[in-house]
Image (cartoon, rainbow, N blue to C red):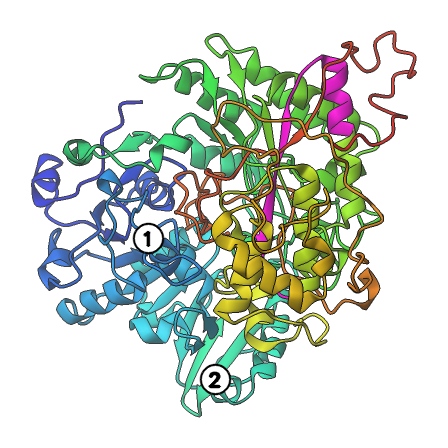
Amino acid sequence: MSAQFLPVNRQDMAERGWDQVDFVYVSGDAYVDHPSFGAAIVTRLLESHGYKVGVIAQPDWNDPASVAALGEPRLAFLVSAGNMDSMVNHYTVARKRRREDAYSPGGQAGLRPNHAAVVYSNLIRRTFKKTPIVLGGIEASLRRLAHYDYWSDKMKRSILLDSGADLVSFGMGERSVVEIADALAAGLSIDDLTFIDGTVYRASSLAHVYDAVELPSFPDLQADPLNYARSFAVQYANSDPFTGKRLVEPYSDHEFVVQNPPAAPLSQAEMDAVYRLPFARTYHPMYEEAGGVPAIKEVRFSLTSSRGCFGECSFCALTFHQGRIVQARSHDSLVEEARAITDEPGFKGYIHDVGGPTANFRAPACAKQTKAGACPHQRCLFPEPCERLEADHVDYLKLLERLRKLPGVKKVFVRSGIRFDYVLADRKHGDEFIYELCENHVSGQLKVAPEHVSDTVLAHMGKPPRAVYERFVQKYEQANEELGKRQYLVPYLMSSHPGSTLDEAVELAEYVRDLGYMPEQVQDFYPTPSTISTVMYATGVDPRTMQPVYVPKSPHEKALQRALIQYRDPKNRPLVLEALKKAGRMDLVGHGRECLVRPEGAPPAKGPRGKASGSATLRKVASKADPARKGSGKGGGKGEGARKGGKGGGKGGPARKGNGKSAGRGEPTRKDGGKPSAKQPAGRDAADRSSRPSSPHKAAKGSPKRPGASSPKSGRAMGGRGPRRP
């Protein structure tokens, strides 16, 4: 655990006897040598292959000398904006500047530029005219081809062209970065590296580009938004390493951007080897005076057990970045790291998380994926689980049991989220998993992400219907009742997702009313680069079907939908009244229990409120959700089938791995306007949900009975009881 940090200045190089490094890694994050940070994985991996690597963290982008601190590298500069897209890091969904940056010393904001990868690359090129530059990380990965940029509200070119870099290494990057290094070390020119999977390069002609699929040209994308939808559909269908084709994006008759097929996923042995690398597991000591780097706090005592996600939520960039094929570390590898964690200063016996993009995904969705890849035009879980899906929690249950039995470990939590529809699809061990989770791995609250309650909106999100979530709630409550525990579900709610009208926003507000709490922070849909939902936002159609989708775009409409979810906040009253009038739901204005607000002049209604995460007390709600009020409403609201689509906002389902661990390349974009989360899986962008309100889904006390053990249910855990809505 006392690994030496890589050189950050000339003195460090001299102490190692180095005159020159092979690679200089330039990062928008502070230097944290922990496997949850992409920079740490890439630099340690290159070191393990015999290369000399130095790190320049958060250089001054106004001073060219700052990127020359280690001199010119022998082989190349490696550039990353950091674990998050720099624009998500800097701005909320309302395009307001964030006040803090969890990936900077002391949480100080403003230590990296906007579009950091582009700025750093151009800064390097001003000083080192011919030295190869390779971009990586989440920002470059999701901007590798032309993309919609929410912050400028226009199409932008491939980051390769705007940055002046020579290559983009997209995805998780371990395979491609080593191949690049070995090729350069063998004497090949960077211009000749056109054959490496998982990379994007520039070409002046297509004379030597074979077997490629040509995408719409950049001028065509600018001329017609529908061309972008068509282009992204092709890109998405070719994001699998087994079936993906080479793609060509023309910019002119003499300028093309070529994307090679994605790199193959790591084997379990290869992934174990990555996490055995000698990480210092903390931030560089030069940050001590500033108070350290906040982002380490959430991941320091956590374990990354897997990467990749076949959940494919429309608003999440994981599929485009990490891929759909789940790769998992072995139990021995995770136990070895857990033992090391128990020896770390400050460890108090609690492993904070064992997960990844989705905690309970520990293997590919089916055997076919390991040999032929994921199906290009069929999803594993949506609209319902595929008949080939092999839902099985046995491996994860055994892993959690081994970890909690380690000496020095008091508790092992699962905080990166579970995919509840996958749990229900496991008919053999799903109930057992819920029981074990409630008994041993939840501390009062379990975060889940159904995101919304309208089936119309959920379909656009790629999420299971509301009824699926309610089945999970029933089983969760049943398990806690049998255990005699009072534990809550914390549902994540999203407003303004494509497909959401005011009708669906009202439906979500009614659901929140029936739960009896007010979310103090609502996640507004954030159109980050290269997600299906962002394409919907930019084009007005679903790229998978090319069918029109309603998109709430104006700041005022988004404010109306957000205010409906937070209708109990007095300052939202004018917006709530306006929204209800527009939706034809003035039946929800009055003195009855079903009303959201009282008439003009009446005192504000009193009712139970949930407290923000971390608050002491949560209240059980007496009122039950009315299944008949699924949007049909009393005052002319449309029925579910008649709706155009609704605004995203909803319950919790699989906590997307944005607050898992960033696997080396940025954080898969999670859409909200909160602060950047300190706990983000490398390889993904995320915004903080840690301050979300606690949920009123709570299980009452009851007589503890372990499933399968002399139970009248004949071994079937938590079966047969009807739903118990709080």
The magenta stretch spans residue 482: yes
Task: Name the residue furthest front.
Answer: 601
Q: Can you say whether 352 is above or below 36 in the image? A: above
| Lateral position of residue 675 relative to residue 261, left or right | left
Does 227 appear above or below 39? below
**In this view, which residue lies farthest toward the bottom?**
253
Q: Quadrant of the N terminus?
A: top left
Q: In the rendered view, would you say 163 is above or below 701?
A: below
Secondary element type, mark 2: helix
Mark 2 / mark 1, whichever is N-terminal: 1
Q: Residues within 10 Å of mark 2 (few under 14, many from 20)?
A: many
- Give yes or no for residue 381 being in the magenta stretch: no
Residue drawn at (74%, 51%), measured in percent from left and top? Answer: 380
First to last magenta residue range: 475-499
- Residue 593: x percent and y percent? 72, 42
Q: Quadrant of residue 542?
A: bottom right
Q: Nearer the viewer, residue 104 or 337?
A: 104
> Which residue lies at the image location 34% right of the left edge and 72% below the top edge?
191
Dot label at residue 98? 1
Helix, strand or loop status at disc 1: loop
Above or below residue 177? Residue 239 is: below
- State which quadrant residue 347 falls in: top left
Quarter occupied by the C terminus: top right
User: Which amino acid type corresponds to the residue marked 1 in the rendered image?
Assistant: Arg
Relative image position of residue 41 (x, y in whole percent): 38, 42
Residue that appears at 37% across and 71% down: 160
The residue lying toward the viewer, choosing from 379 and 258, is 379
Whether the residues at callouts 2 and 1 have beta carbons within 8 Å, the answer is: no
Q: Which mark is residue 472?
A: none
Tag 2: residue type? Answer: Phe
Residue bearing the label numbered 2? 218
Residue shown at 47% from the left, 89% from the top: 219
